Amino acid sequence: MDDLPISKRTYAFLTLPNYSLIALTNAIEPLRMANRVANRTLYDWHIVSLKGDPAVASSGLQVTPTIALADLGKVDILFVCGGIDVRDSVSAQLAKALRRRADAGGALGALCTGGYILARAGLLNRYRAAIHWENGHALREEFPLVALTSQVFTIDRDRYTCSGGTAPLDLMLNLIEHQHGRHISHQVSEQFVLERVRDSQDSQYVPLRAQLGFTHHGLTKVAKLMEENIEKPLSLDAIARRTGLSRRQIERLFQRYLRCVPKRYYMDLRLRRARELLLQTAMPIMEVTASCGFQSPPHFSRCYRQHFGRPPSAERRRPAVAQSMSPPGN
């Protein structure tokens, strides 16, 4: 992939009122740096708003120059940039403009809560999509035809969606690698002092309180105890004694609020920790096995494969870019 032919791509970022400036910046800066390290123009970009006036970000800042959506020519991907109060940005005019671009074959994307706008326009129906975890529950309820994921970003055919914060940086670095090779993407990540670039298999960290929708003291206490005892997992009876809850109470809480048994939740915690160690350290698999509380490498490998669809040894060999990605222009 390092010898891919050079072809310039143009992206546009449709800024909505109160959009997330950190999400926008994390999307644009990798493109700028890719141009710099390649010493040629690999990417152009435009800042867009519905009427052409600079939108005010949630931080109170504005980005110029900004052009009107109607004046935007053909681009490879148009990203809708959301932030707080995204529902206030919904309008028939905006939805119509986005549908027109989709009908013309244009690829669409979304940063942070921008996916809500695409969903309202019917442009994510039967697509996999990612959105900031705070908006996940509402989106699932309101748009049952959207296959919402918990991933940091999702690429499904001509839809490119990601959660907020630094997730757009990961999305762009994956696109850069897919389009211009690993050498360029690695140079960009080195310039930004990144230890690891997340891929489309990485999930957002969703706080337990967000999963529950409210704070349940007993359940959060159990979960915290599990997180603190990864290397030497505690039995459910030991957890019950330490938390002052009965075994049956804990089982009911997990089933009612998390739709799983405590053992499954605990296993997921340990496997996520194992994946972090495999991707972010050079620890031998034997040490990862012990650090995450597994009795033997075969047991660890079996559990890991069941959860992630591949053995631990394949985690370090596989390329960062999902094989199913097919960005426009390729």
Image (cartoon, grey):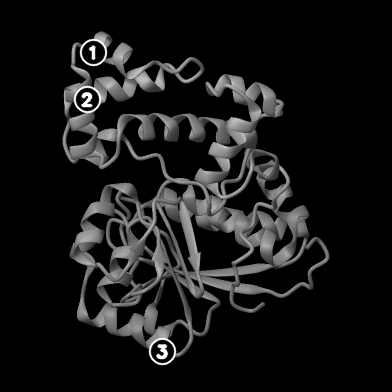
Instruction: For mark 1, give the secondary structure.
Output: helix
**Residue 225, visible in the rendered structure:** yes
Q: Quadrant of residue 227?
A: top left
Residue type, mark 2 in image: Ile
Mark sitting earlier along the chain (3/1): 3
Residue 57 appears left or right of 274: left
Name the spot of residue 283 as percent of width and height, x first: 69, 25
Residue type, mark 3 in image: Asp
Q: Give residue 169's mark.
A: none
Q: Quadrant of residue 108?
A: bottom left
The residue labelled by disc 3 is 103
Residue 172 appears left or right of 283: left
Q: Nearer the viewer, residue 61 or 170?
A: 170
Say which of marks 3 and 2 sits in front: 2
Q: Nearer the viewer, residue 29 or 312?
A: 312
- The residue at the point 64 percent across, 68 percent down is 43
Instruction: For mark 3, give the secondary structure.
Output: helix
The residue labelled by disc 2 is 250
Q: Is residue 170 above or below residue 303?
A: below
Instruction: For mark 2, give the secondary structure.
Output: helix
Q: Quadrant of the C terminus?
A: bottom right
Q: Are marks 2 and 1 in contact (CB under 8 Å)?
A: yes
| Residue occupying the far bottom of the picture | 104
- The residue at the point 36 percent across, 52 percent down is 20
Q: Quadrant of residue 219?
A: top left
How many numbered discs, if any? 3
Residue 65 appears left or right of 217: right
CA separation, marks 2 and 1?
Answer: 10 Å
The residue labelled by disc 1 is 243
Say which of marks 2 and 1 sits in front: 2
CA separation, marks 3 and 2?
Answer: 51 Å
Q: Nearer the viewer, residue 72 or 291?
A: 291
